[in-house]
Image: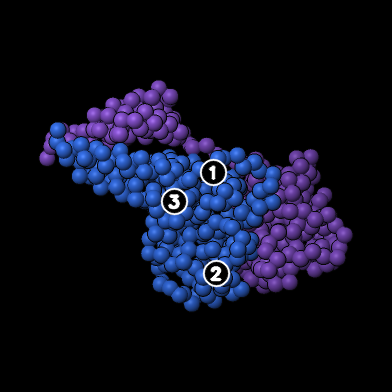
Chain colours: A blue, B purple
């Protein structure tokens, strides 16, 4: 059974080598984290190489949630971080590992669910994955030599989580208890806008359509939206459609 | 040539596997450290497995100081840390990695030479090695599962060195180069939505209209919107109106 301690979920997105999944499990458990989610592992699941490498932290693999896509894997979360090595064109808040885990600790103390996504070994997360995150974690490595592997990136983030635990009492929790939307609600909102705007001919010209869609999704996921905001934004769109259909 | 930047030397004491020496070199160089010393490597020197693993950080191995014992390896240093997994009976100051690297940074700024010793993979440093250190670094791992390997221990310490330099922002790094919308632009966006949604019959029933308008304005003004976001949101609405007007 996963520990009772409230904590972020670590989401390995399309990991390739089983050894790295096992090493990531060890890195997590070294700092007391035991909620792993795995999206579309290249070599299927269960993975014997992962089990062999995880020795001592194998429970994390047994209990891992396996999902087929990122949207599903983070659907129940209120706030999602994406770890990236490079700066991206995407406009999102960028955190250090320390800042991110302090933010995660605050949100979790308020009852929110938080996830941290880690990309595949070589390429890292795709823009489409990052667009689903609320914020980015950037490990400020040596610009001449940035070669952290998956388990090392997990290790540093888990280490900062543990460090943040010592700071929780010192931190003011002054945000009102807002009823924040979950990730799945933001995803549905994005889908709704994408579908209707598609019908309306918004994504034009064709060769820019993909980029426009990512920008739009990125904007929604970056906004601190409450459930009420999401309902209102659905309502706005629905009303425009009704208006069109009435044709008056 | 080692970089000019003043920094601690990392001393690998009797390391066993060449792969781990190479991985330690990579971990160091990820955070800009390039002064390695190696005491009595089990498999001799140079070590081809170390070279293969270090790829990109191989220069650290070429330039490493190889010594036969610990006393010789740290003889020129003013202050020496020993990393240990367990608390020892020895009476020495115990530092967290963060505290240790802050101490190291202060001493180095005063012109002192500082070294950090890392023990062999299985057993760690012997009491006799630790006795040569001025202080201990203890990584606060999960007491139920303390299994950091050599390169991971080097990685966390190097990361804390880099943090001590102030190169790593302690808190949120604000969104890079975001071109934030000014208040007047948010106001115009609110006006645009209010006007069009009014025409579309969104603010209904009548007695709730005022409250709905306030909620909508409040949402826009609460969002961290860039100029590009504002343009996109205008575009979304304009497109819906065009779609309606086409009446197709």
**Along the polypeptide, which appears first: circle 3 or circle 2?**
2
How many numbered marks, from 0 up? Answer: 3
**Along the polypeptide, which appears first: circle 1 or circle 3?**
1
Tell me what residue is drawn at x 39 percent, y 27 percent: B186
The correct choice, above or below, for B239 with respect to B67 in the image is: above
Q: Are marks 3 and 2 on the same chain?
A: yes
Tell me what residue is drawn at x 37 percent, y 28 percent: B210
Q: Is residue B172 left or right of residue A223?
A: right
Q: Residues within 10 Å of mark 3 (few under 14, many from 20)?
A: many
Residue toward you, A87 or A25:
A25
Q: Is residue B128 left or right of residue B119?
A: right
Which residue is labeled 3 in the image? Answer: A182
Q: Residue A41: in sight, yes or no?
A: yes
Asked which secondary structure carries label 3, the reply is loop
Cα–Cα span, label 1 and label 2: 32 Å
Asked which secondary structure carries label 2, the reply is helix
On the image, the x and y values in percent for residue B81 come to: 78, 55
Q: Residue furthest right?
A: B91
Q: Residue furthest front?
A: B207
Which residue is labeled 2 in the image? Answer: A60
Which residue is labeled 1 in the image? Answer: A177
Label 3 resides on the chain identified as A
Tell me what residue is drawn at x 57 percent, y 67 percent: A2
Q: Is residue A127 left or right of residue A142?
A: left
Q: Is residue A178 left or right of residue A218?
A: right
């Amino acid at each position: 059974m996963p520990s009772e301690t409230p904590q972020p979920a670590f989401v390995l997105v399309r990991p390739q080598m089983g050894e790295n999944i096992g090493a990531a499990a060890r890195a997590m458990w070294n700092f007391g984290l035991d909620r792993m989610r795995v999206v579309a592992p290249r070599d299927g699941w269960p993975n014997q190489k992962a089990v062999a490498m995880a020795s001592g932290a194998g429970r994390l693999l047994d209990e891992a949630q396996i999902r087929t896509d990122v949207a599903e894997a983070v659907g129940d979360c209120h706030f999602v971080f994406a770890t990236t090595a490079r700066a991206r064109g995407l406009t999102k808040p960028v955190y250090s590992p320390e800042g991110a885990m302090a933010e995660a600790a605050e949100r979790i103390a308020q009852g929110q669910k938080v996830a941290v996504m880690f990309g595949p070994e070589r390429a890292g997360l795709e823009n489409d994955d990052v667009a689903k995150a609320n914020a980015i974690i950037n490990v400020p490595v040596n610009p001449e030599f940035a070669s952290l592997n998956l388990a090392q990136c997990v290790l540093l983030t888990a280490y900062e989580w543990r460090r943040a635990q010592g700071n929780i009492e010192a931190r003011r929790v002054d945000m009102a208890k807002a009823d924040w939307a979950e990730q799945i609600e933001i995803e549905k909102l994005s889908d709704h806008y994408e579908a209707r705007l598609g019908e309306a001919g918004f994504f034009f010209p064709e060769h820019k359509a993909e980029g426009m869609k990512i920008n739009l999704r990125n904007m929604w996921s970056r906004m601190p939206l409450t459930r009420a905001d999401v309902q209102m934004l659905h309502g706005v769109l629905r009303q425009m459609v009704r208006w069109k259909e009435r044709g008056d």
